[in-house]
Structure formats: structure tokens, C-alpha cells
Amino acid sequence: MQDRVRLGVNIDHVATVRNARGGLHPDPLRAAEQALVAGADGITAHLREDRRHISDADIEGLVVLLRAQSRPLNLEMAVTQEMLGIALRHSPHAVCLVPEKREERTTEGGLDVAGGHNWITPMVAQLNDAGARVSLFIGADPAQIDAAWRTGAAVVELHTGAYCDAVRADRVDDAEAELASLRVGAARATGLGLEVHAGHGIDYDTVSAVAAIPGVVELNIGHFLIGEAIFVGLGPAITRMRDLMDVARGLGPGT
């Protein structure tokens, strides 16, 4: 029997719907509360430079809410001085450094840690000193994994988008190759002493294979769960995802 994989629920797109009308509803903090009740182990939120979904006020509210419940906030952010200042001010449990381009719809690809080592490493050091658990969102590339380890980050989050896209397009060979790459990457990272998380594009059809990867201890899932919540409710959507993850690790549903 394997250890249970943690589930971090990303609530960004609750804020996307709210911002479409410019009002107060739906409230991302309410979504965070419901996600925790439904079985989420923590909450993830990406404060983008253009504030297209999560706002500064959302982060402030989430920090208060999650500290009161002794639950972790994973703040996703670009590697910029503005975002560093926000993270240092709020001291979230975890910070995940991600690549960010204003023209992209969602995060495309992983962070180039090997190419940006000289500017990423000092930021990791400042966040470490502030007590944050730093994660780097990267592809399952050995060079990127090795570079992530050299920065002093405690965690890598492997980008699962290519695998999930291949599954949805029914490109079986590509899906198998991407999954094999994730397995190898997770093993390499674990061997270096890094904690391994995974996320991006995961849905009910792809979660089991990712959750079953040895060494993966946390999945961060957002867009699919928020979309599914329109039809079944956020609680049931998360409960089903949680059950699929548990079964994939040889545990019974509802563990």
C-alpha cells in the first residue's frame, strides 16, 4: 500500500468568473472553504502580474482563512521583484515559482531553471529564509530537475500538460511517452532529495496515472474541478477526484 497523495485545489477560475462581471460573486474564499470540507489538503492560488483572476485582496483573505484553519496556502507566482515582495509580506506556507507571459491563456510549459539559475536562485534563498516551502514548476527534463535542485528549492512540481493533452487527443504513443518521462523525472527528483508534486490539465481521465507515479506526493488541480463544479457542485467534484487519487495509490475511496 502506498502513501496517500495530497490534493491542492486551485481556485483561480472562481475569481475568473467573478471578474467577468466585476462584482463580488462567486467568492474564491467561499470556494476555498468548500474545497477543504470536501477533502482538499490545501489551496493553490496564482497571483498573476495582470491580476486577471486572483487579486491581492483574495490573497490577503486566503492567508487569514487558511491560517485560522491551520491549512496550507500554495501561492503560485512569477519570478519578479513585485511578487517576491508580496510573498515576503504574507509569508504563505508554500510558494510555487512559475513562468508567466501576459499573452498566454494559462501557464505554458515549465520554468527554465537552467537558463535562469542566476536570478531564480537568489529569490529561492530569500523565500527559504522567510520560511516558505519553495516549489519550482518545471517540465520533467533531467537538466531542469538538476538545476532546480541546485537552487535550494525543496520541491519541484512537474508539468503534466503534455501528458493530459495527449490522452485527450487519443495519441496513445505520445501519452505513454509523456507518462514515462514523468516517471523518470519523479524518480530523478526524489533521488536528489526533492519533494515531487505534479499538475496542469489533470482531469478524471488522467489523474489516476499521474497519482500512481512513485514519488509524487501532491497534485494541484484547478480548472477542471471548477468547470465540473458547474454541473455537480464543487464538493462532489473534489470528492470524486480525491477517490480516484486514493484508488490509484492502492487505497480505498474515501480513505
Image: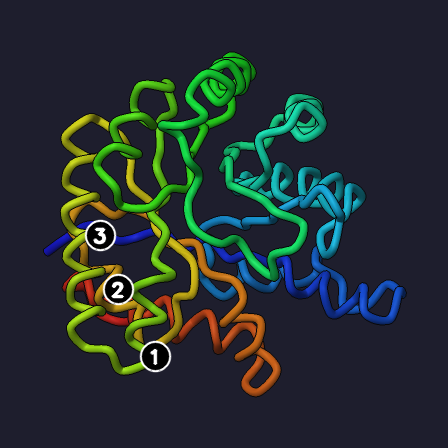
3D distance between C-alphas at marks 3 and 1: 17 Å
Identify the residue under disc 3.
182
x then y, percent, for residue 126: 54, 14
Identify the residue under disc 1.
168
Q: Of the residues shown, which amino acid type is indicated by label 3? A: Leu
Describe residue 46's horizontal placement relative to residue 174 as left or right.
right
Q: Of the residues shown, which amino acid type is indicated by label 2? A: Asp
The mark closer to the camera, 3 or 2, is 3
Quadrant of the rendered structure where residue 49 is?
Answer: top right
Q: Residues within 10 Å of mark 3 (few under 14, many from 20)?
A: many
Q: Residues within 10 Å of mark 2 (few under 14, many from 20)?
A: many
Quadrant of the rendered structure where residue 246 is?
Answer: bottom left
Q: Of the residues shown, which amino acid type is indicated by label 1? A: Arg
x then y, percent, for residue 229: 57, 78
Quadrant of the rendered structure where residue 117 is?
Answer: top left
Q: Nearer the viewer, residue 28 or 115?
A: 115
Whichever of labels 3 and 2 marks the residue nearer the N terminus, that label is: 3
3D distance between C-alphas at marks 1 and 2: 22 Å
The reply to whether discs 1 and 2 touch (Cβ–Cβ < 8 Å) is: no
The numbered mark at residue 246 is 2
